[in-house]
Amino acid sequence: MTTLLLASLALAACGQSAPAGPRVFFVQPQDGATVKSPVALEFGAENFQIAAVPPGEVKETRPNLGHHHVAVDADCLPPGSTIPRAAPWVHFGDAKNAIDMQLPPGKHRLTLQIGDDLHRTLEGLCSTITVDVAQ
Ligand SMILES: [Cu+2]
């Protein structure tokens, strides 16, 4: 009796379409891939809007949108951090989602992180992969 009840509750829970959270990810390369420099990077986002930073001085951020940032051999910054305008971070404030990047041979971590109009990190919107750059 109890088992049946739990089973139907679980089914009911699955049937509801819970809103999927926003997410950011590398479309390419794949995590663990062996690649050749220059490496074609492509970024993707789901349930989140990628938008260019407005021109001029930005004082306020717009909700639920932002732009990509990528860093080589760096980790995700904690939520609420301002992403430095300095190496290793590259800002895509023009809303671009791709770049061909020169990388030295060897293993490298690639971190993709969303920042809002004020280049501040957002909870859960970061992804790190590792690639092996061939000689
Ligand atoms: Cu930025």
Image: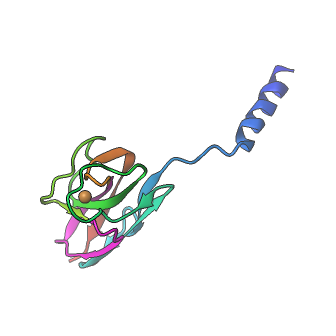
Q: Quadrant of ligand 1?
A: bottom left
**Is residue 115 or residue 101 the one in the foreground?**
115
Can residue 109 be seen from the camera position used here?
A: no
> Quarter holding the C terminus?
bottom left
With 61 as the anchor, is 30 left or right in this view? right
Q: Is residue 5 magenta?
A: no
Residue that sits furthest to the top in the current view: 2
**Is residue 7 depicted above or below 54 in this figure?**
above
Q: Is residue 112 magenta?
A: yes
Residue that sits furthest to the right in the current view: 1
| The image quarter in which residue 134 lies | bottom left
> Quarter holding the N terminus?
top right
The percent position of residue 20, horizontal first and vertical second, equals 56, 48
The residue drawn where x is 24% and y is 55% is 58
With 57 as the anchor, is 14 left or right in this view? right
**Is residue 13 or residue 57 the one in the foreground?**
57
Name the colour scheme. rainbow
Residue that sits furthest to the left in the current view: 86
Q: Which residues are magenta?
A: 92-114
**Is residue 132 or residue 52 the one in the foreground?**
52
Can residue 33 be seen from the camera position used here?
A: yes
The percent position of residue 124, horizontal first and vertical second, equals 40, 45
**Is residue 61 depicted above or below 101 in this figure?**
above
| The image quarter in which residue 101 lies | bottom left
The residue drawn where x is 25% and y is 51% is 118
The percent position of residue 127, horizontal first and vertical second, equals 36, 53
The percent position of residue 17, horizontal first and vertical second, equals 68, 46
The residue drawn where x is 26% and y is 61% is 70
Q: What is the total number of numbered labels drawn onto the structure image?
A: 0
